[in-house]
């Protein structure tokens, strides 16, 4: 090719016309320029265009894959968000139920404790009343014995002789205590005479 280009250049230089137009290039330059441009275009289509197309296809595939991946990730994130919201709603419902159950259970426990405390108070009061009645009966019996002894001593001193009969002693003591009880109950009434029965 370079030989033909040399030949064209020699032919153009021999025919050298002096009335050449500056705007129109010589034929040899036009042919060489066209041939070089053709070779450049052929090289472009043969080597560069497939590389560009391949790179473009890879980039398009990467972009489309990235978009598809991003859309899939967005769908997955949306699904996870919905699942999280559902779990959160369920957890709030469960927490409210647990709180209500705890309040109900707490009220039941308080009521049970209150009822148990009242039962224990009633039992303690009942035991205390029984103990008090037993203590009172014991004290009354002890006082009666002591009053009986004092009354017999007093009666012996007043009458002037020793009262020997146990039945008489018991009757005197009972009459005396009855008189004391009557005087305590009816503050204005006069006590019955001691030993009036015997």
Image (cartoon, rainbow, N blue to C red):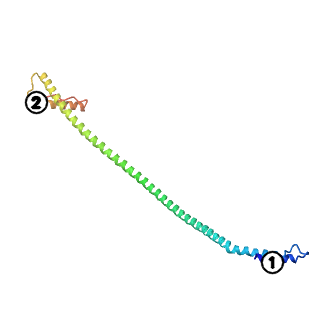
Q: Nearer the viewer, residue 168 or 60?
A: 60
Between 141 and 68, which is closer to the camera in this rendering?
Answer: 68
| Direction from residue 148 to residue 81 in the image, left or right | right
Q: Secondary structure at mark 1?
A: helix
Q: Residues within 10 Å of mark 2 (few under 14, many from 20)?
A: some
Find disc 2 in the rendering and name its residue.
168
Residue 153 sits above or below residue 67 on the image: above
| Residue that mark 1 sits on | 7
Relative side of 111 to 1, left or right: left
Where in the figure is residue 64, as x and y percent of width and height? 60, 68
Q: Is residue 193 above or below residue 33?
A: above
Crowding near pointer 1: few (<14 within 10 Å), some, many (20+)?
A: few
Q: Does residue 28 sit above or below 146 in this rendering?
A: below
Residue 85 % position (x, y):
51, 60
Whether residue 26 is situated above or below residue 147 in the rendered picture: below
- Helix, strand, or loop for circle 2? helix
Q: Residue at x 27, y 43 (%)?
A: 123
């Amino acid at each position: 090719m370079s030989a033909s280009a040399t030949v064209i250049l020699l032919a153009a230089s021999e025919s050298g016309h002096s009335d050449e137009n500056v705007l129109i290039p010589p034929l040899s330059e036009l042919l060489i320029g066209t041939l070089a441009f053709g070779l450049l275009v052929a090289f472009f289509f043969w080597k560069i265009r497939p590389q560009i197309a391949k790179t473009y296809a890879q980039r398009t595939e990467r972009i489309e894959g990235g978009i598809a991946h991003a859309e899939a990730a967005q769908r997955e994130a949306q699904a996870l968000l919905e699942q999280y919201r559902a779990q959160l709603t369920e957890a709030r419902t469960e927490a409210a139920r647990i709180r209500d159950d705890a309040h109900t259970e707490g009220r039941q426990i308080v009521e049970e404790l209150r009822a148990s405390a009242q039962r224990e108070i009633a039992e303690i009061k009942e035991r205390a009343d029984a103990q008090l009645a037993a203590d009172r009966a014991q004290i009354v019996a002890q006082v009666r014995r002591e009053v009986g002894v004092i009354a017999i001593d007093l009666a012996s001193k007043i009458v002037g002789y020793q009262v020997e009969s146990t039945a008489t002693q018991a009757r005197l003591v009972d009459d005396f205590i009855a008189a004391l009880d009557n005087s305590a109950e009816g503050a204005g009434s006069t006590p019955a005479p001691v030993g009036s029965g015997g």
